[in-house]
Image (spheres, rainbow, N blue to C red):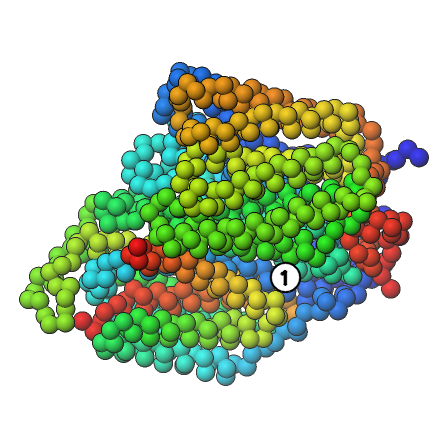
């Protein structure tokens, strides 16, 4: 009959990392860091840094996003597979933007 | 074989071997979905990059007419909601039902505050005829005397400012849609949590909804400087 | 010994519409997809029929030019989005992947069912566009014609494609998580059948690429409604941006169409040479390489669009690079034949067809990847022939080969071998007669998407149209005898070929839960010497 299954013990390669519980104080620390960085990015935008304005704003945004991903989204404590998946996603976005810009930025070279 | 039936842990679906495997699969599935969202919003970011470099003065002009205080406030609100969401996940992990419900509710309220503020901003934009379409009007404030260091004065083409607002509404609108969906998901979680459906062993839906919510926060973390903080020094 | 069917299996465990429409069994969902895509194949085929009828004469005398524009548009849209992209993954992939890895189902069975409903919802919008007057922009929807000037149902078609895209994303997501998380004990990555590797690579593309066509179609839809000029040069927009966004997905999409087919061919070549695929590791990595490199070449569709020459050079170089892993696979399949025990049953005939025709199609892709040559060949029938060699000569042949090979597993019955061989022969002859003349036509300068052409092209066009009618017979034949075999075909054993792979270690048809006992895998893929290994329980 088909309703009885033998449930084999999981082989080593299927062992998943035990659930990691991040302490609350880490969450609060990240929260305050994010608020502070928001204040910084707003303040800096009022100074004229020429082309660097955009660079600085994006750098701060990337840093904030990284904090959210690593700690709020637990990527720091996740499996290697999950980390690779996230890296691949970001990488692919980069490919799309970089190769498209390779067209627009070089049109005037001819 | 009878013990296989009796010992099936609460919440385990029939095609998984263990709660751990199920949790890991669910988490991986949500991350893969978030990758698709990165590429989805990515197309809009690419469009933004190209048109900002094509119409820099119009983007500055359009950005100046956005309310930076409301934008910054909303950023703080969303970051706060990420904190409350992370805490909700924490309390689900330790099996505290009351605090789980509390923090899920706080998260949803903060999300609704964000949407409310966006509603205010959108209304203001409609009233000023800044919504793209047949009704769009742009009074060029750069008709004012050309200031030193403001080479864009008098050179702003209203049609291209309309392009900025098109991108503004497309990006923030899509973001708001994702927030509404997220708020809906959290509402469902609240109902389930109140009914005691989550335990310290089985709370995967809370975790993966949390991942989704944080992602929506991350999109805003990029949208805010890219849309509200362009050329603020001018 | 006359094979006996198991008393209960996934087909007879429950009856009635509800048991099918609300199923979460991946095998039933695969069959639901089979019904849907076959229907859409015939819709797309109907458009092709009218096209080839029109092109039998040089004058545009069957349909008006505007109607002809609608015909090739709808042919492309139906065939690409509603047949080729789902065919192998959603039918064969859904059915086989849990079986091949030793799992009871995919990771998210309800999402699987949802993806079928989403697929049909998207198709509904597109069919609505078809019956209410069609779309005439070409399946490529280039702007600003599609956004501003076309008076046809662009919006409905766009919405249909947008919705169906989610079906593709969910399938890919499901496969990725399933293959990572649900393999049976002992089934490590390098014991997986190459079919699974191919589908894993395909799923990567589906997940990373489809969202971009989604946002592109969304922008197109907004533009049709609001008319800002986001892609309209008259208003400051950039039509080449649309092309970048469109092809960022649509080029990898062709690998969604061909990679699963290659996975099928690997299984067929191994089974019908009774040998392990030569260079298993290389073929597995080649699948991943095709998926990755496939994302780096989209600019080769923009060579004449005004794209920078320097970007064109990069894309051209990368387009040559992406051919390498495909070539590796062809070499390895060929090497597998050496000293193999080759048998020429129908699935193997289709596999041979694939290898030969895909090679021609792939090589002509290299012609097109050369920028200088592309300027002469772009928008001619050379391009049309190139992609039909890959998609029809390649994908559809592999799909038919796979359908025949796994038919006993799916239905519990064998198909009639004589008729099947005849069908394969008719398909091969019909295909080449249809599409080889098109290479010549294109090289001689006949443009694509034209309903009338100069007299000197007529002979080749007539050959092509004649071939199309033969091809049609070749496609209808399997439909007839496969359905016939479900009732009257001889009952198949669990492993009629016999072949390796976990799917053959369970009954034909399999039980709903796939296996009486989840196997513990201790052997390599394609270990033909180990055919008689018992499937053993753990511990």
Give the class, few, some or many, for how many residues have Cα within 10 Å of label 1's Cα (few <14, many ≥20): many
Instruction: Work out which quarter of the rendered image holds the N terminus of chain C and state it.
Output: top right
Instruction: Work out which quarter of the rendered image holds the C terminus of chain C and state it.
Output: bottom right
Q: Residue furthest right?
A: C1
Vertical comparison of B142 with C445: above or below? below
> Hey, which quadrant is residue C85 in on the image?
top right
Can residue C37 be seen by looking at this rendering?
A: no
**Residue C203 placed where, x, y %?**
58, 52
**Residue C350 placed where, x, y %?**
69, 34
Vertical comparison of C531 with B141: above or below? above
Disc 1 on helix, strand or loop?
A: helix
Vertical comparison of A34 with B143: above or below? below
Vertical comparison of C302 with B114: above or below? above
**Residue A106 placed where, x, y %?**
33, 58
> Hey, which quadrant is residue A21 in on the image?
bottom right
Can residue B162 be seen by looking at this rendering?
A: yes
At 61% from the left and 48% from the top, the residue drawn is C326
At 23% from the left and 78% from the top, the residue drawn is A47
> Residue beneath label 1, please?
B25
Total label count? 1
> Hey, which quadrant is residue C345 in on the image?
top right
Q: Chain of mark 1?
A: B
Q: Nearer the viewer, residue C251 or C154?
A: C251
At 29% from the left and 64% from the top, the residue drawn is B227
Q: Nearer the viewer, residue C376 or C176?
A: C376
At 52% from the left and 50% from the top, the residue drawn is C320
Q: Nearer the viewer, residue C244 or B126?
A: C244
Q: Residue furthest left?
A: B145
**Residue C292 placed where, x, y %?**
55, 56
């Amino acid at each position: 009959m088909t309703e009885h299954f033998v449930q084999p013990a999981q082989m080593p390669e299927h062992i998943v990392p035990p659930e990691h519980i991040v302490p609350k104080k880490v969450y609060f620390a990240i929260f305050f860091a994010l608020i502070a960085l928001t204040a910084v990015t707003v303040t800096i935008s009022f100074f004229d840094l020429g082309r660097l304005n955009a660079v600085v704003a994006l750098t701060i945004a990337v840093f904030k996003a990284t904090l959210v991903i690593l700690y709020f989204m637990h990527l720091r404590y996740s499996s290697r597979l999950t980390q690779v998946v996230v890296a691949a996603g970001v990488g692919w976005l980069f490919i799309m933007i970089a190769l498209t810009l390779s067209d627009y930025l070089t049109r005037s070279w001819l | 074989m009878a013990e296989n039936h009796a010992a099936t842990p609460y919440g385990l679906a029939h095609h998984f071997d263990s709660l751990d495997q199920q949790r890991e699969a669910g988490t991986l599935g949500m991350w893969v979905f978030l990758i698709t969202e990165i590429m989805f919003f990515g197309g809009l970011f690419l469009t933004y990059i190209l048109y900002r470099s094509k119409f820099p003065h119009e983007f500055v002009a359009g950005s100046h007419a956005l309310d930076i205080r409301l934008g910054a406030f909303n950023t703080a609100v969303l970051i706060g909601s990420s904190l409350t969401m992370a805490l909700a996940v924490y309390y689900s992990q330790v099996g505290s039902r009351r605090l789980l419900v509390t923090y899920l509710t706080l998260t949803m309220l903060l999300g609704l505050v964000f949407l409310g503020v966006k509603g205010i901003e959108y209304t203001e934009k409609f009233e000023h005829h800044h919504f793209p379409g047949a009704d769009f009007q742009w009074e060029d404030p750069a008709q004012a005397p050309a200031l030193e260091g403001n080479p864009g004065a008098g050179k702003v083409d209203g049609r291209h400012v309309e392009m900025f607002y098109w991108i503004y509404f497309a990006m923030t609108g899509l973001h708001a849609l994702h927030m509404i969906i997220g708020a809906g998901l959290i509402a469902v979680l609240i109902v389930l949590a109140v009914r005691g459906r989550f335990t310290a062993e089985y709370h995967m839906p809370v975790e993966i909804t949390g991942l989704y919510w944080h992602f929506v926060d991350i999109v805003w973390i990029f949208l805010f400087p890219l849309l509200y903080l362009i050329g603020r020094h001018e | 010994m006359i094979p006996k069917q198991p008393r209960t299996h996934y087909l007879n465990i429950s009856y009635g519409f509800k048991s099918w429409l609300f199923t979460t069994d991946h095998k039933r969902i695969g069959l639901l997809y089979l019904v849907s895509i076959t229907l859409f194949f015939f819709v797309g085929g109907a458009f092709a029929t009218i096209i080839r009828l029109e092109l039998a004469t040089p004058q545009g005398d069957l349909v008006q030019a505007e109607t002809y524009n609608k015909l090739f548009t709808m042919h492309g849209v139906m065939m690409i989005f509603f047949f080729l992209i789902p065919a192998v993954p959603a039918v064969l992939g859904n059915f086989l992947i849990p079986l091949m890895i030793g799992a009871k189902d995919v990771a998210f069975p309800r999402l699987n069912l949802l993806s079928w409903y989403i697929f049909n919802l998207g198709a509904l919008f597109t069919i609505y566009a078809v019956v209410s007057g069609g779309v005439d922009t070409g399946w490529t929807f280039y702007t600003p014609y599609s956004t501003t000037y076309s008076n046809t149902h662009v919006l409905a078609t766009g919405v249909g494609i947008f919705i169906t895209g989610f079906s593709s994303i969910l399938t890919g997501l499901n496969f990725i998580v399933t293959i990572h998380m649900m393999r049976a004990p002992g089934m490590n990555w390098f014991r997986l059948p190459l079919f699974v590797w191919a589908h894993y690579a395909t799923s990567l593309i589906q997940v990373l690429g489809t969202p971009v066509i989604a946002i592109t179609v969304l922008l197109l839809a907004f533009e049709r409604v609001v008319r800002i000029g986001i892609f309209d040069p008259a208003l400051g927009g950039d039509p080449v941006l649309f092309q970048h966004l469109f092809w960022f997905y649509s080029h990898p999409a062709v690998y969604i169409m061909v990679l699963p087919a290659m996975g099928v061919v690997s299984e067929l070549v191994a089974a019908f040479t009774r040998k392990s695929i030569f260079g298993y590791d290389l073929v597995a990595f080649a699948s991943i390489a095709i998926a990755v490199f496939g994302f780096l070449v989209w600019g080769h569709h923009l060579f004449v669009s005004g794209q920078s020459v320097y970007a064109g050079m990069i894309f051209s170089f990368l387009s040559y690079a992406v051919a390498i892993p495909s070539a590796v696979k062809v070499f390895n399949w060929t090497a597998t034949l050496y000293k193999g025990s080759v048998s020429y049953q129908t699935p193997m005939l289709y596999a041979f067809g694939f290898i030969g025709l895909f090679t021609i199609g792939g090589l002509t892709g290299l012609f097109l990847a050369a920028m200088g040559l592309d300027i002469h060949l772009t928008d001619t029938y050379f391009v049309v022939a190139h992609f039909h060699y890959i998609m029809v000569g390649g994908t559809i042949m592999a799909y038919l080969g796979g359908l025949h090979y796994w038919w006993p597993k799916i239905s519990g019955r064998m198909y009639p071998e004589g008729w099947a061989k005849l069908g394969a022969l008719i398909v091969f002859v019909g295909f080449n007669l249809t599409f080889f003349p098109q290479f010549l036509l294109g090289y001689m300068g006949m443009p694509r998407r034209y309903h009338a052409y100069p007299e000197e092209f007529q002979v080749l066009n007539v050959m092509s149209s004649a071939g199309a009618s033969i091809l049609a017979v070749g496609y209808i034949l399997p439909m007839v005898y496969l359905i016939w075999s479900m009732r009257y075909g001889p009952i198949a054993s669990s492993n009629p070929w016999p072949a390796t792979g976990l799917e053959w270690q369970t009954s034909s048809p399999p039980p709903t839960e796939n296996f009486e006992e989840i196997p513990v895998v201790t052997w390599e893929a394609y270990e033909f010497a180990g055919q008689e290994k018992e499937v053993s329980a753990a511990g």
